[in-house]
Image (cartoon, rainbow, N blue to C red):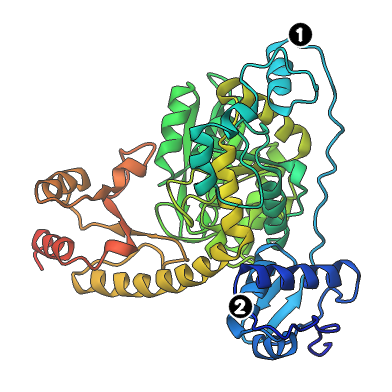
Amino acid sequence: MPGPSMPAPLARSNRAVKPDGTRVEQLIGRIRHWIEQGLLKPGDRLLSVRAGATEQGVSKNTMAEAYDRLVAQGLLEARRGSGYYVSRIARPAFDELQPHVVEAIDTVSFLREQLEQSQGVRVGDGRPPPAWMEGSELGKHLKAIRPNRHVGFEHGYGSPWGFAPLRERIALMLNERAIVAAPNQVLLTQGANNALDLLVRHLCDAGDTVLVESPGYYPLFAKLKLARVNTVSVRRRVDGPDLDELAAKVTEHRPKVFFTQSLAHNPTGGSLSLPVAHRVMKIAARHGVTIVEDDPFADVLPSSAPRLAALDQFERVIYVGSFSKTMSASLRVGYIAAARPLVAALCDLKMVTQVSTSDFVERIVYDLVASGHYLRHLRRLRVRIEQVTAIAIDRLARIGLAPFAPGAGGYYLWVLLPAGIDDRQLAREAAERGIFLAPGSVFLPDRATEASALRVNVAYADDPGFLGFMAERLGR
C-alpha cells in the first residue's frame, strides 16, 4: 500500500489564513487538479487531517472540511481508522445524445422542447424569460435563499431528467454500491413514491398480475389497486422473501413484476441475505420477471450490502432510491436507475404526467451532498440509529415483546402481538390517549391469515406513554 501522499504544498501567504469557505474551495480545487492530472492515483492514501493541515498551512477543521467535500463529490473515500484515499471508482460519463431538434408534432416532443430548450428562439414557449423573474422582487428574495451562491437560480421547469450534477453524483453513489450506472441511466423523481407511481404506470396494465411482499410497503398496494392491477403476496421472512413461496407463485401466476425492498425492509426491519438474493435472481430470470428494488435507506447502510441491482446490473432489475428517509421528508427527491431505454421512456412519462420535478429542490439536495454536509449528517445518523435500536429492543423486551428481525440499520421493528389482541383495535385505543400506532394489518395486502402486529419506529420506542400503554394492555 502506498504511503500517505500530497504533491507540492499550496503557496503560503504571509497573511493569516481564515478557515472559511474560500480556503476550503482552494484546497478542493488543488486536490481535484492533482487527481485529474494523475499526480494522485486511485488508491493513494492522503496525508492525515493533522499532517495535511500542517503541510497546507491551514487549520485541521479546514482540512477536514475539504476532505469531506471531496468524499461527498466521489473523488476521495474515507476508510474508518485508516484515513482518506483517492477513489478507485471512475467517474461515470453522461454520454448524452446531442440535443435533437424535432418539430412539435406530438405532446411528448413539444414538452421536451419546452423543458430542454434546444431551440434558441422561444416564441412558442409557455413562460416568460428567466430575466423577468431574476430582476423582480421574487428574484431578489430567492437570491438570498438559493442553495449555491455560485450557481444562478433557474426560473424554468428544469430538465425533465432532473438536475444534471445531482444525477452524476447519484451515479457515483450507485457505483460505490457495485451498481454500474452512468448519469443518463438516472431519472430524478419527487421521492420514491413518485418513482413507484411512474413504474406502475409504465410497467403494468389493468388486469396484469404482480407480486408484492407481505408485510410490505402499503402505499404501493394503493397505487396498484388504483391502476387495477392484481396483486399476489409473497411472505417476507427475516432474510428476504420466502423462496419456496416466491417460486410457486411465479410459476402459478406468471407475474409481470415483483416489487421488493431488499434492505432495512419497511415494515419488518430485516435485510436480504446474499444466498437469498442469488435465488431470487435465478427465479426471476427463469420466468422472465422484472424486479423493482426499492432501497430508501441505502445512504445509511453498508455499500457492500447485498442488492439485487448489483447482482443483475439492470438486465431485469429497476432500482429506486430516495433522499427523503435520510435527509428530509420535505425534500422530495428520489430517483430511478435502470437500463437507458427504459429510463428514457420513463422520462417521457414523467413529462406527460407531471412535466418536471423541482429544479430548486434538487439543487438544494445537490449542494448538501457536494458540500459534505450530507456526509457528516449520515455519520451522526448511523450512530443514532444504532443507539436507539438497541434501546428500543431492550424496552420492548421488558414488556414481553421481541422484534421479528434485529434492526438492520433502518427505522423500523416489526413486533408480533400476543394472540387475542387485535392490532387495529389496539391502535384505536391508543389514539384515544394521544398515541399513534401503526397496526400491522395496514402493511398486509391480504389480511385474513396474518398474525396481529405493530410496526415500531425505533426513534419513539422508549416513550414512557407508549411503553406504559402497551404494558397495561399486555397485562405486564
Q: Position of residue 82 (x, y in %)?
A: 67, 86
Q: Is residue 20 visible in this depiction of the protein?
A: yes
Relative depth, front residue between 13 and 244: 13
Camera-side mark, 2 or 1: 2
**Looking at the picture, how far across and down is residue 156, in whole percent?**
62, 30
Q: Residue at x 48, y 59 (%)?
A: 264
Residue at which label 2 appears? 18
Left or right: 236, with 13 as reference point? left
Pick the front one: 243 or 313? 313
Category of crowding for the residue at label 1, using alpha-carbon neighbours closer than 10 angstroms: few (below 14), some (14–19), many (at least 20): few
Give the Cα distance between marks 2 and 1.
57 Å
- Residue at 58% across, 44% down: 362
Q: Is residue 466 above or below residue 11?
A: above
The type of residue carrying mark 2 is Lys
Which quarter of the rendered picture does the C terminus lie within?
bottom left
Q: Quadrant of the N terminus?
A: bottom right
Residue furthest front in the image: 15
C-beta proximity under 8 Å, tags 2 and 1? no
Per the rendering, the mark at residue 224 is: none
From the viewer's perspective, tell me whether residue 445 is left or right of residue 339.
Answer: left
Name the N-terminal-most of marks 2 and 1.
2
Look at the numbered disc 1 and give the secondary structure of its residue: loop
Relative to 393, say whether 191 is above or below: above
| Nearest the eye: 271 or 175 | 175
Give the structural element (helix, strand or loop) at label 2.
loop
Number of marks in picture: 2
Residue 200: x, y in percent?
56, 29
Q: Which residue is mark 1?
A: 105
Q: Could you say which quadrant of the image residue 98 lies in? A: top right
Residue at the (78%, 88%) spot, across then down:
4
